[in-house]
Amino acid sequence: MGIEKGRRGLVEDLIEKAGGCAVVDGGFATQLEKHGAAINDSLWSAARLIKDPDLIKLVHMEYLEAGADILVTSSYQATIPGFLSRGLSIEESELLLKKSVKLAVDVRDKFWDAKNRISGHGYNRALVAASIGSYGAYLADGSEYSGRYGPHVDLDKLKDFHRRRLQVLVEAGPDLLAFETIPNKLEAQACVELLEEENIQIPSWICFSSVDGENAPSGESFKECLDIVNKSDIVSAVGINCAPPHFIQGLVQKFKLLTEKVIVVYPNSGEVWDATAKRWLPSKCFDDEKFKLFAMRWRDSGAKLIGGCCRTTPSTIRAICKVLKEKTAPP
Ligand SMILES: C[S+](C)CC[C@H](N)C(=O)O
Ligand SMILES: N[C@@H](CCS)C(=O)O
Ligand SMILES: [Zn+2]
């Protein structure tokens, strides 16, 4: 079982067009908040899918203007059980999942149509990656940063949790799938097995979080985690998201030794999430200038998809584009 040839090259083609390194957008939820959206909610940014589609479109547009080559959709914490708990029906919940992809695709198409009328604009046609947050994200208890799901959560439970959302998101027609903040080996295995079982024909990446810069949050080694991901041809890229930036260079070097897949990194600003208070704690935090320096190091260490996660903004993405696409960066 594998991805048909024409689709498998999509990510690699984008990387080549972008000059060897493509830029993933930044903290979608962070930019929503900058516009005043309240997301201290168990659905987190997905709460805005119910109420604020125009704001979601604006944020996607801002990341495109900043030069993002890949837009990650608003579905990180959008799940069918999460929406059901708000009194929505299954049909309404599935429509919201599809809407998360459609909003991003529509904005990408509008942006690209407009840019195509101008010569030498320096942008690439962006890809839309449907965000699939971990089970811990859905739990809304911070466990995407601990990997502690408890003894009752086994492989089948994780596959059952991910299955329907995955099917619905794929039906909506994204270019790729972005599994985000996976905190342990078991969930990586669930994602890989599900992609195979569902015979998914679009590329995907699996990104882990990390809180010590060495291992997955569960304490399991990345060797164990990547051994699972490597077994599958269906996963195009593997990496780290929403970990502090100063861990990333070492992790890229480690991943280079553990996998031949494309390496994707999009760390947060270095701040720490307080899942009880639902806010970011002030802590060691890296600004856009630091991201410029780091991004070059991550590229030189072998990462080919680079961006920002929580607490980074379009200005971070603009800064990363400036250094990674020196000759072709958009204005
Ligand atoms: C990427 S984290 C900051 C998203 C929010 C988290 N899952 C929570 O609900 O607490
Ligand atoms: N891509 C997500 C965050 C993952 S931690 C978002 O910003 O909605
Ligand atoms: Zn994040």
Image (cartoon, grey):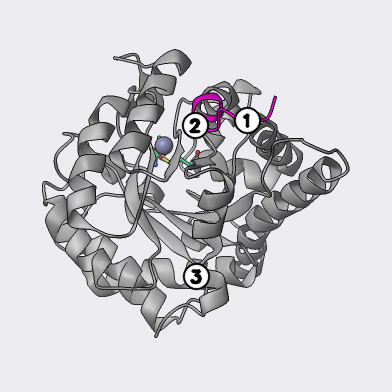
Q: Which residue is mark 2?
A: 324
Quadrant of the snapshot with the C terminus: top right
Label 1 and label 2: CA atoms lie apart by 8 Å
Quarter-of-image position of residue 117 = top right
Quadrant of the snapshot with the N terminus: bottom left
Mark drawn on residue 8: 3
At mark 3, the secondary structure is: helix
User: Residue at the location (13% across, 56% down)?
Assistant: 223
Residue stretch rendered in magenta on the structure: 321-331
Dot 2, crowdedness within 10 Å: few (<14), some or many (≥20)?
A: many
User: Is residue 136 or residue 23 the one in the foreground?
Assistant: 23
- Main SS category, magenta section: loop
**Mark 1 beta carbon near ligand 2 (under 8 Å):** no
User: Is residue 259 or residue 269 the one in the foreground?
Assistant: 259
Label 1 and label 3: CA atoms lie apart by 26 Å
Say above or below: 254 vs 331: below
User: Residue at the location (57% across, 47% down)?
Assistant: 70
At mark 2, the secondary structure is: helix
Mark drawn on residue 329: 1
* Residue 84 visible in the shown view: no
* Residue 51 visible in the shown view: yes
User: Is residue 330 or residue 197 the one in the foreground?
Assistant: 330
Label 3 and label 2: CA atoms lie apart by 24 Å
Among numbered discs 1 and 3, the one appearing first in the sequence: 3
**Image side of residue 144 versus residue 89, left or right:** left
Labels 1 and 3 touching (C-beta < 8 A): no
